[in-house]
Amino acid sequence: MGQGCPPDPLTAAVVREVREERAHARRVAGGRADGHRPRRHGGGDPAGVRRRHGRAPPARRPRQGAAAVHACALAARGERRQDPRRPVVTRHRATPHRPRRHLASRTPQRARQRTPQRTPQRTAIVHRAIRVTTASCAGFYLFVYGVDRPETALYALFGPVALGILSPIPGSGRQRAAVILRALPGGLVLITLGTVLAVHTWAAVLGMLVVGFALTFAAVAGPRPAGAAPGLQLFYILACFPPYAPDTLGARLAGLTLGVLLLAACEVYLLPTPPTATYRQSLADAVTIAGRAAAAAASGDLSAEGADDSADRLRETGRQLRLSRLPPAERPAGAGRADRALAQAGAAARRLLDQLAHLRHTPPTVSVVATATSGRGANADATGQGTKADAGATGQGTKADAGAETDADAASADLLGRVAALCEATATALRTGRPPPRSGPPVLDAAMRDFQGLRITQATGPPQSVPPAPVLRRQSSVLALTESARILQTAVRVGLDGRRRPPIPPRELFWYADTPTYLLWWRRLTGHMTLRSVLFQNAVRTALGLGAARLVAGSLDLSHGFWVLLAVLTLGRTTAGGTWTAVRSALAGTLAGALATGTLLLVVGRHTDAYAAVLVPAMLAAFALGPLLGIAWAQALFTLVVSAAFAQIAPASWQLAEDRIVDVATGSAIGLLCGLLAWPAGARREVRRTMAALLRSCGPLITGTVEVLLATPPGTAPLPPTRPVLHRLRLAEAAYLQYRSEPGDRPEVSMDWHAVLITANHILLGAHWLPRFDLPERTVTPEATALARTTAGHLVLATDRVAAICAGEGPPPQPPAVPAYRSPTEVRGHSPLPALIDLEHWLNSLTAQLARIESSVPPGR
């Protein structure tokens, strides 16, 4: 309302009513029963009343009708109402007095508050040290002192160490035991291969290159195979060094088998790691929350007090489904059909929760004023002037608009109710493990098409039957979240079934449902066989480092040369800076451990009983204190462990400590050199390249989708290909996951790479579902076509600009500002088509996301 306009009678009455309520609130005391000083800003003495009567006088209930009308009037003007029952007070009077404490008295309390967060991690590390020490020493002592088989004892010792300490296998005790048992056949094959190839240095080097690359590249199969890879590499390393003794192959295999079986038993029965919530359980809980939110939106039960909090809770629930927040063992990261489907279901659930959170800020109905000003055609919206005359000119027009709005809201509520029922059935299926009924998606598809048919009927009918623009946009939001729910249920059905099934529309979105399993794995492997894949880079770097270490150790005939390869394997990082940091600490720790070991060997001599007594506490200390105190402590204590073990197998002198220093220094130098030569920046540079390539590939997808919707006649334009974008999205996701695991920039000084992934997913989803539900029934007008194409062109320019920023190339010249695309009534003289409404919703949301990404660029970058 302008300053020169007189207030309307309704507003004046509301203002008078509110003034009376506030005057009454100042006259009547509102004391609290708990005895605290009441918050007030007017006269009265509620404390004196409480002393005289022993209780506070009852407060008069305010007149809710006037308050509600006043709240609606203020909401229409974008203002907030101050509750008369809560007078304005200063912060120091509203907050209870708390005695000040000295900083020193608060520090122990803060330390105690932080301790419980780290206690579970420390407990898990200590328990793992106990399990590995028990399994290793049981087999080692049995074969050394029981049956006098030192070769077998060596493999019985290093088998549990390789798979229990060196391999970060995620999961509970039973999950790790299952992975360990599945890795046992592979370990036996690798020991056999290493024993055979130890005949010559070059044969062992070539074998090391192949084994190192293959096992490191196994990370494409998920966290569990990636976790077991270092231990399997150690099996080949142990066997490929001289002496060439094929006659000891049986003893080696027996020792490894016993050690691995003992470790698996300890994982299950000795201080086992408790299981965490499975991915299906977490997904079911999130879907249940989404179902309740959809049911509340369908019934219109959105209280003004909790709307913002509920929206925040919905978004936070969606964020909890991100793979980075899930335990590694529960992440659906495999290449099989079930993992792909569950991963897609999680993405659909996150999107559904975010859409429901956005819907909570969109009221199911609009006021009569909004109906009148936005539903009268092009003139009101194009000029930006409120047509108050139109609102009051014809009561019949207003009633017709209100009827169209009511029909639209009823259809939206019905569709939201179906979404709520679908979410409930999907959550039940996830908890029971049985796929949801097959009749679900076709029924929902039919409901969505009926909903779209109603929108088209209203849009192509008489002008008074066209709902106002806010209702049309809310319908678009409801249709989009219904499509997310349909994708969610379909993906859950495929994931729980796991079998190959007929094609599911849209086939580009569910391409894996009818693809053979071997082709799924082949596509995953070949998709990462590129220099732009961080997994491929890691595999090449590791293979080159291990191969070079095997060549140097064999050529120089280093004693205990496998320590050189072990140093490369344990100290190598994905960045040169990380490798240098690890090498410095490892060399210092190895030097300290070698000094202590040399002293022990000189003092004890050949008394093996002393080494047997030292081995157990040394292993416990190395495996427990090493992860807690750092690499230096781990290397120092592990030097003591291996020296005590080898001194029991064969006579040893202080020169064993010297060999340890030389081997670790050699391996550190080789690992550091490989880190400097092979992608020294790790994922930091690759995440920029892959994100930039992803955004550039999205540009043609945006324009192609717009052309499909605007084709003349409708439905004649071919669908744009989405496979290139999907391929680059997978590479970008892998680079982002590794980037998050590397030390580097703090989150507040780095770009919002996750927002880039969200934007690409949004573009892909729109390219799939807009042509499926939004092919217009009639030709789009030239004005609307030109406006949509212009907006899409500006959006592509903005995408290229953000891609250049991501690549570090510097932003290109600033393009013209992307105008807010308003399809319905801004195009003069024509009714808004649902296709244009949905296209508007898609393009404007992409524009906002790109602007948010560009605003996240740190200053000076």
Image (cartoon, rainbow, N blue to C red):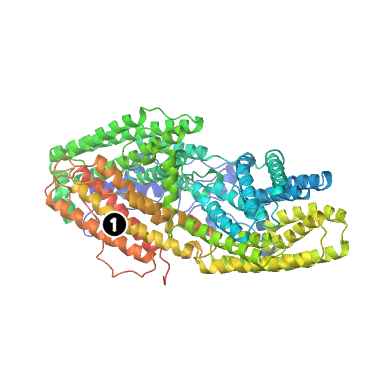
In which quarter of the view is residue 4 placed?
Answer: bottom left
Categorize mark 1 by other alpha carbons within 10 Å: few (<14), some (14-19), many (20+).
Answer: many
The answer to which quarter of the image holds residue 566 is bottom right
Out of 311 and 849, give the one closest to the viewer. 849
- Asked if residue 528 shows in the view, the reply is yes
Residue closest to the eye, 141 or 302: 141
- Above or below — where is 152 with respect to 431? below
Query: Which residue is at 67% across, 59% downward?
Result: 562
Q: Is mark 1 on a helix, strand or loop?
A: helix
Q: In which quarter of the image is residue 834?
A: top left
Which residue, as the protein is rendered here, is positioned at the far bottom? 860
- Relative side of 463 to 178, left or right: left
Q: Where is residue 19 in the image (x, y as percent from the top left)?
A: 36, 50
Q: Where is residue 422 in the image (x, y as percent from the top left)?
A: 39, 32
Q: Can residue 406 be seen in this view?
A: no
- Residue at 73%, 56% (x, y): give it: 622
Q: Nearer the viewer, residue 184 or 283?
A: 184
Q: Is residue 455 left or right of residue 581?
A: left
As drawn, 397 above or below 604:
above
Report the number of numbered marks: 1
- Name the residue located 48 percent from the left edge and 57 percent from the top edge: 536
Quarter of the picture containing the N terminus is bottom left
Q: Where is residue 574 in the image (x, y as percent from the top left)?
A: 54, 62
Q: What quarter of the picture does the C terminus occupy?
A: bottom left
Q: Is residue 764 left or right of residue 1?
A: right
Q: Is residue 798 or residue 304 the one in the foreground?
A: 798
Which residue is denoted by mark 1 in the rendering?
A: 699
- Left or right: where 33 falls relative to 510: right
Q: Which amino acid, by three-letter code, is at mark 1? A: Gly
Image coords of residue 466 (percent x, y): 18, 40
Residue sitting at x 35%, y 65%: 804
